[in-house]
């Protein structure tokens, strides 16, 4: 899918071009500026480039953590209960390159195996967040091994691409892991609204720090990524952004059957472009059936030209062509793993390995270091 994206210069207005489903809202009274059905991938405001919500109800795996059917190399059927993506026997995305931006992989349920050209690796999920700076170039794989062989392997996560400014597009690649046990959350006094703060700040609670070269590393850029969960009867006001009108903000209604925004009933699977300078009330009315979930993306635009072709994001098409030449020449360090779709043993728990140093989640047993 990613390799099919066309090379061209993208502007903020381009990325937010109204679809036929867009409805104009009153700018004088409502914070909602545009509303549309969710697309795949999501429409995203600058400084974001790309966002997808993965929800796959994978069945039990076999002894090799494989799925019960073989992938076709391009399995993205939105109507299926689960997809193989680019995987063959194990779902996921075998090794592929990136340059010029960052990936934020924010998990809710299930596990992901990460490998890369720097010999880093890890298994994370169930609320963990991985933030990777591709910088001047990295090759990585993201596989979804079906670890459970006696029960289903549900998987839910967001992958978000955050652009890098020109000055940081060629920095050394890096990644950090934020374990679920340490990720910041804010819950209202009535317990009906919970917000996971993956980036930014809410009510004085600051998210764990992003990589040092990230656009989000400077608080002035007002980057925020929040996962909002509303129980039935919840009513909560998203505060105005600190950046005011200088910041972009989008809301994505990903799960639930009942949601009101500013008192208006919102259809499921809806995207909203909103005025970040205004607070906005969200409500899951009493008597609703189940929770409502939203993703919020917010930040000040970088304000530079964007040229994108598949996994490379630069400022000019000339730089895109150079990225292809560099990758063909160097393979961004080459692939050090035995297989393009490498996964770790079933017995391996959650971990993150950078170089020779292995990090475990808080409270994990030392025995889990042994594969």
Image (tube, rainbow, N blue to C red):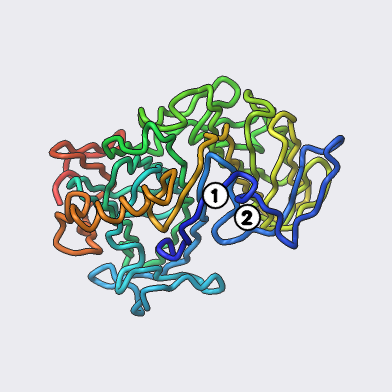
Task: Give the residue at x 31% y 51%.
Answer: 323
Q: Nearer the viewer, mark 2 or mark 1?
A: 1
Residue 291 visible in the displayed image: no
Residue 49 place in picture, x, y as percent: 51, 47
* Observer-nearest of 208 and 33: 33
Name the quadrant of the N terminus: bottom left
Tell me the crowding category of disc 2: few under 14, some 14 to 19, or many 20 or more residues within 10 angstroms, Cα based. some
Residue 243 place in picture, x, y as percent: 63, 25
Residue 4 place in picture, x, y as percent: 44, 66
Q: Which residue is mark 1?
A: 10
Residue 229: give its label. none
Instruction: Identify the residue at the far top of this view.
Output: 204
Q: Which residue is mark 2?
A: 255
Whichever of labels 2 and 1 marks the residue nearer the N terminus, that label is 1
Tell me the crowding category of disc 1: few under 14, some 14 to 19, or many 20 or more residues within 10 angstroms, Cα based. some
* Observer-nearest of 156 and 150: 156
Task: Give the residue at x 75% y 42%.
Answer: 283
Residue 296 visible in the displayed image: yes
Determine the CA span between mark 2 and mark 1. Answer: 29 Å
Left or right of 330? Residue 282 is right
Left or right of 50? Residue 350 is left
Residue 355 place in picture, x, y as percent: 16, 39
* Observer-nearest of 240 and 343: 240
| Mark 2 in CB contact with mark 1 (< 8 angstroms) | no
Residue 356: image quadrant is top left
Task: Give the residue at x 58% y 40%.
Answer: 297
Q: Is residue 52 above or below residue 4?
A: above
Label 2 SS:
strand
Label 1 SS:
strand
Task: Give the residue at x 77% y 52%.
Answer: 266
Left or right of 122? Residue 22 is right
């Amino acid at each position: 899918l990613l390799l099919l994206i066309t090379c061209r210069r993208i502007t903020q207005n381009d990325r937010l071009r109204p679809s036929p489903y867009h409805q104009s809202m009153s700018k004088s009274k409502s914070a909602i500026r545009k509303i549309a059905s969710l697309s795949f991938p999501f429409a995203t405001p600058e400084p974001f480039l790309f966002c997808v919500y993965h929800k796959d109800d994978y069945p039990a795996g076999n002894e090799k953590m494989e799925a019960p059917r073989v992938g076709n190399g391009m399995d993205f059927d939105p109507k299926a209960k689960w997809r193989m993506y680019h995987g063959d026997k194990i779902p996921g995305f075998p090794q592929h390159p990136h340059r010029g931006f960052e990936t934020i992989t924010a998990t809710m349920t299930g596990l992901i195996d990460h490998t890369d050209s720097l010999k880093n690796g890890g298994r994370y999920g169930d609320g963990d967040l991985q933030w990777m700076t591709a910088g001047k170039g990295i090759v990585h794989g993201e596989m979804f091994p079906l670890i459970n062989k006696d029960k289903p392997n549900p998987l839910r996560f967001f992958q978000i691409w955050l652009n890098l400014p020109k000055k940081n597009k060629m920095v050394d690649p890096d990644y950090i892991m934020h374990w679920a046990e340490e990720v910041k959350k804010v819950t209202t006094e009535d317990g009906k609204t919970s917000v996971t703060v993956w980036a930014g700040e809410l009510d004085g609670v600051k998210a764990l720090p992003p990589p040092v070269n990230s656009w989000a590393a400077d608080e002035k850029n007002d980057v925020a990524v929040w996962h909002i969960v509303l129980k039935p009867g919840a009513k909560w006001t998203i505060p105005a952004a600190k950046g005011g009108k200088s910041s972009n903000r989008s809301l994505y209604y990903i799960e639930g059957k009942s949601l009101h925004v500013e008192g208006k009933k919102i259809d499921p699977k809806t995207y909203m472009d909103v005025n970040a300078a205004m607070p906005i009330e969200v409500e899951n009315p009493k008597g609703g059936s189940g929770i409502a979930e939203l993703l919020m993306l917010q930040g000040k635009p970088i304000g530079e030209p964007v040229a994108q072709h598949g996994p490379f994001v630069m400022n000019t098409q000339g730089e895109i062509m150079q990225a292809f030449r560099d990758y063909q020449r160097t393979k961004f360090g080459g692939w050090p793993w035995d297989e393009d779709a490498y996964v770790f043993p079933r017995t391996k728990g959650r971990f993150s390995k950078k170089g020779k140093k292995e990090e475990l989640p808080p409270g994990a047993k030392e025995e889990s270091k042994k594969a």
